[in-house]
Each structure stands twice: as structure tokens, then as C-alpha cells.
Amino acid sequence: MFSILTTGIAVTFCIILPCLACLKILVLTRKWRRGSQKVIGFFHPYCNAGGGGERVLWCAVRAVQESHPDVRCVVYTGDITSTASQILNKASSTFGITLSHPVDFVFLQRRHWVEATRYPILTLLGQSIGSVWLAIEALLACPPDIFLDTMGYAFTLPLFKYIGGCRTGCYVHYPTISTDMLNVVECQNDSFNNRKLIARSKFLTKCKLIYYRAFAFMYGVAGRCSEVVLVNSSWTLNHINQIWKCQQITSIVFPPCDISSFLEIPLIRKPTQDILGEKYEGKLVVLSIAQFRPEKNHILQVESFHKFLSICEDPSKHLLLMVGGCRNEGDESRVAELKSLISKLNLQEKVEIRTNISYGELKDLLSVAHVGMHTMSNEHFGIGVVEFQAAGVMPLANNSGGPKMDIVKEIQGCQTGFLAHDVTTYSEALRDIFSLTAEKRTEILASARAACRRFSEQEFKQDFLAAISPVLVSRPKTE
């Protein structure tokens, strides 16, 4: 048995090593043909998704262009159904971001290899291996001098560092695996990352723990191939430090939030009918801003709002408006499930869903909203919560992660919003918010606006450029 195993390992290495050597020769040849201009590549396969991660991407590209106009910026994307101009136009309409110089796109054909639906089991491992396969396509198409993973595919870092000869960096929004995920499995809790079938079985739980711990080890090895590590919050910093163990090169760079334009919105709410139409005259709007992903927990929003209506003074006055991006069929199916729940609870006249709205529409909705609801547990940061604060919308966020540790916390003894964690606490918090006196509401909103200036685009630019300067200012090794 041992001899068979060693023979298998030897044969595998005999196949893999020559392939890697050929790949490196191809990359070096294409880099030589490319010319001497320094190239920085941003790996972001879903750059046209329209979420918070994409705002970070475009602000990062803009920061590099403005501070280093001689550097060529390349974005690796799998959005093959969109053109470069359509992607840039969406960045402008969704985020209000316009680039000062052209940006090159490398359109990747293999993005389906990182889709979660492709891997019904061992999803994290499957997606990680798929990301390497996708990264090989990117590396061969346009080998950069500096590689930045801005979406969380840590297993691409060794490839670009050792085969591509690149300086490497990454911006981590959310760890692929975290100690919280390990704890959920270990405690046999049912969650979006732990099926009931596994949670109810001690044997399957042990098997999954072995898998998770092995994956966490590999994830840490891959992450340490980054020369600079940027994280978006204190929560993410804690988890990355525990798993990657490279504190000396890791720093918090809060994501850029569009507070400049939202700060222009008056604290006094516009008449609802002016924005939503006469049908909504006198409505008090609870607004949700989040992509329709499972971890955003939109079901909790609907159920909490339903319970709130049963304990508030006048249910007819309130409207829940849920807006967010739909990236794929999975997101669209979740919207359909939400609509089914809304119908089941008889909330068709009190809850609305709007998908893929424009930046202008978002500002209009923020100008009439009274409460901004956020329900993701252990959200890595929470850009939407900051936008609520800046726009004069009372934030009601989950009592965990970035919102708890960085955003909705007391600043110099002043309250900046509300926190909750389940249907009961959310519904009671909604009741308390709508029961505030005008003076108390204004006091909290003013404190929230002052606090959110820490998350401006200008602050992001300064912190981002300072963090990546070790790889940006020096020439990469190409051998």
C-alpha cells in the first residue's frame, strides 16, 4: 500500500512539475512581449455585480490611476455578456464613479468554475480549485507586474506570485472560511453553511470539521503568499489574523462609502408621494439595501416587519422597501421565494422588492426612508449601514460583525443607531425607533452623520494607497 501511494505521488509530481514549468515559460514570454509599462491586475470576476465589493474595486482603480497615471490598470472579469463601456457606465450610474483614465478588461470564459452551484458538496474546496483554473486563464491572457485579488480568491495568490513572478496583494471583504463557521459546525448549529443533515449527525459533523480545518490550513498558506493584506473591518481583521497569521503585513482599510453625495440629503424626510407616487402618501418607509444573497437574511426582515406591524400603533402607515442587486439565477430564485413569503403573510400592500436600481433611484429612496434595516449576521463590514447614517436614515443593524464593532457604536458617548439579532428584537427596535421624539431622533442622526465621515472615499484612497505602497512603488521580480 505504501509503495503504491509513493508511486502515485511521484507520478503526480512528474506530471505537474513540467506543466508548471511550461506555464511559467509561457507567462514570462508574454510578459516580455507586453512591454515595459507597469501593469497592475485587479482580479474581480464579478466586477459588474453592483455591490459593495465592486465599489471598493472601482475606487481602488481610480485611486491608482490618479496617483500613478503611468501604471496600466487591468481588470480580470467574467462578465462576458457585457462590454467594457457597459461595465464602466454601470459603475458610474450605480456608484457615481468615473475613471480618469482608460482601464483594460480581460474577459474570462471560465467563470462558471467558481459558481457555488457547481459544487453541491465540498463547495469551498471546489470554488477554490475553480478559482485557480480561472486565474490561469487570466495570467496567460495578460500577466501583470502587480496582482491584487479584490474579491476573496486567496488561492490565486500562489499562482501569480510563483508562476507569474508578480508582487501580490489582496483586499479581503469576507474570509472564505472563518472561526465562526468552524464554531457553527462544531456546535452542530443549523446555518447557511451547515445543513440540517450534517448538524444532526455527530459522525458527519466530525467529518466536516476535519474538512474545514484542513481547508482553513490551506487557506492560511495561500493567504500568506500575499505581500500586503488589506481587510475591510475589525471583524475581518480578527479572523484573518487567526487563520493567515501574518499580522505584520495586515491592515484595516475601511471600504469607501458614498457619504459625500448622501450627506447632501436633508435630515428632514421628503414627502413619500414625491418619490414613490401618490399611492404612498404619508407612508413611513423602512428601507433595506442588500444584494439578494442567502447570508443577507432577507427572510428575517420580512418576518420582523410582519411582527412589528402587529405591535405598532398604526400598521397602515408603514412600508418595507427591499432593494438590491441580482447577480444570477440563484439570486432571482431567492427573490421569488421572498415574494412567496410576502404573499403568504398577506403583506403584498406593505412590502415591495426592487432589483438592480440605479444610483439616482437609490438616492431618492434614501431621501424618504425613515429606517434602514440590515439583517446579515456577522456582516464583514456593512457599507449599506454607513450609507443609512450619511443619508439621515436611522440604521437598524445586526448586533454582530462590522456593524457592531465599527459602525453602529457610541462615539464620544453618543448613540449612532440601533442593533438587534432576531425577529423579536428587530420588531421591538422598529417600534422604539418610530416612538422617538423628534429631538431624540435628530440627535441620534446627527451623531451618526458625524461618525460616518471615517468611511469616506477620500479616507479610503489615502489608506488604500498607503497599504499597497510596498508592492506598488517597487519593480516586481520577473524571474
Image (cartoon, grey):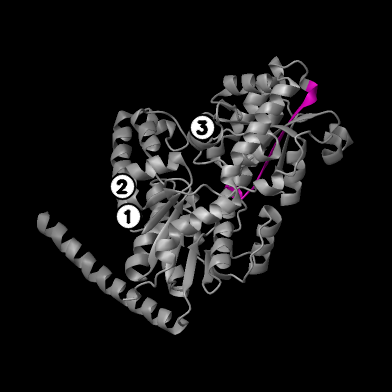
Label 2, secondary structure: give it: loop
Label 3, secondary structure: give it: helix
Q: Which residue is mark 2?
A: 245
The label shown at residue 297 is none
Amino acid on which disc 3 is placed? Lys
Residue 318 magenta-drawn?
yes
- Residue in view at x 28 percent, y 46 percent: 214
Amino acid on which disc 1 is placed? Arg
Is residue 105 at least partly visible in the picture?
Answer: yes
Q: Which residues are magenta?
A: 316-330
Q: Residues within 10 Å of mark 3 (few under 14, many from 20)?
A: many
- Residue in view at x 84 percent, y 33 percent: 280
Residue 223 image position (x, y, % from top left): 35, 54
Q: Which residue is mark 1?
A: 224
Point out the tag, 2 or 1, that comes first from the N-terminus.
1
Residue 248 image position (x, y, % from top left): 33, 50
Quadrant the N terminus occupies: bottom left
Work out whether 331 lies above or below 60.
above
Q: Are marks 2 and 1 in contact (CB under 8 Å)?
A: yes
Work out whether 351 lies above or below 73.
above
Answer with left or right where residue 416 lies relative to residue 128.
right
Say which quarter of the image contains residue 181.
top left
